[in-house]
Image (spheres, rainbow, N blue to C red):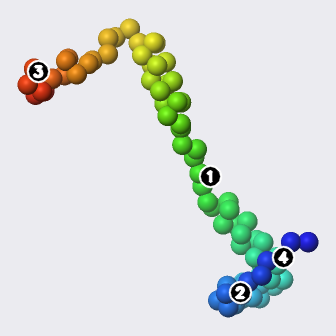
Amino acid sequence: MPTLNLKDPEVYRLARELAQRRGTSMTAAVRAALAEAVEREPVPRRRASVEEILELARAIRESSDEPFLTDDDLYDEWGLPR
């Protein structure tokens, strides 16, 4: 059976206090507190890879009837915005 060894006196004190307030064992109090914290914590979003972003850009380019602007369309011969 897995064990959890609490070496921080403050963590132990808080677990004991929560158990007393709830009228449960320390194990039940810690389990409930952790379950509540997990429910509140948002699931981290996976970051898109460079390949996925490039594939999305290709798909957008292929699906568009409008021409894409290039640097020449945006800037004059001196590099200033048109």
Residue 76 circle label: 3
* Crowd around label 3: few <14 · some 14–19 · many ≥20 (10 Å): few
Q: Residue type at mark 4: give it.
A: Thr
Q: Amino acid at mark 1?
A: Val
Regarding mark 1 in the picture, which secondary structure is present there?
A: loop
Classify residue 29 by image quadrant. bottom right
> Relative to 71, is 61 on the left or the right?
right
**Residue lying at the far left of the rendered structure:** 78
> In 3D space, how far apart are the residues under numbered discs 1 and 3 (Cα atoms)?
47 Å
Q: How far is disc 2 from disc 4 in space, using C-alphas? A: 13 Å
Identity of the residue drawn at 19% across and 18% down? 72
Report the Cα–Cα distance between label 3 and label 2.
Answer: 67 Å
Position of residue 60 measured from the top left corner of the image (x, y, whole percent): 45, 19
Residue 62 visible to an observer of this rendering = yes
| Residue 9, image quadrant | bottom right
Q: Earlier in the sequence, mark 1 or mark 2?
A: 2
Neighbour tally class for label 4: few under 14, some 14-19, many 20 plus, Cα within 10 Å: few
* Dot 3 amino acid type: Asp
Mark 1 vs 4, N-terminal side: 4
> Tags 3 and 2 in contact by the CB under 8 Å rule?
no
Mark 1 surroundings within 10 Å by alpha-carbon count, few (fewer than 14), some (14 through 19), many (20 or more)? few
Question: Earlier along the polypeptide chain: callout 1 or callout 3?
Answer: 1
Q: Amino acid at mark 2?
A: Lys
In the image, residue 40 sits, relative to residue 54, either above or below, namely below
Q: Which residue is mark 1?
A: 43
* Above or below for 12 versus 74: below
Instruction: Compute the Cα span from label 1 to label 2.
Output: 28 Å
Task: Kindly identify which residue carries mark 2.
Answer: 7
In the image: residue 72, left or right of residue 26 = left
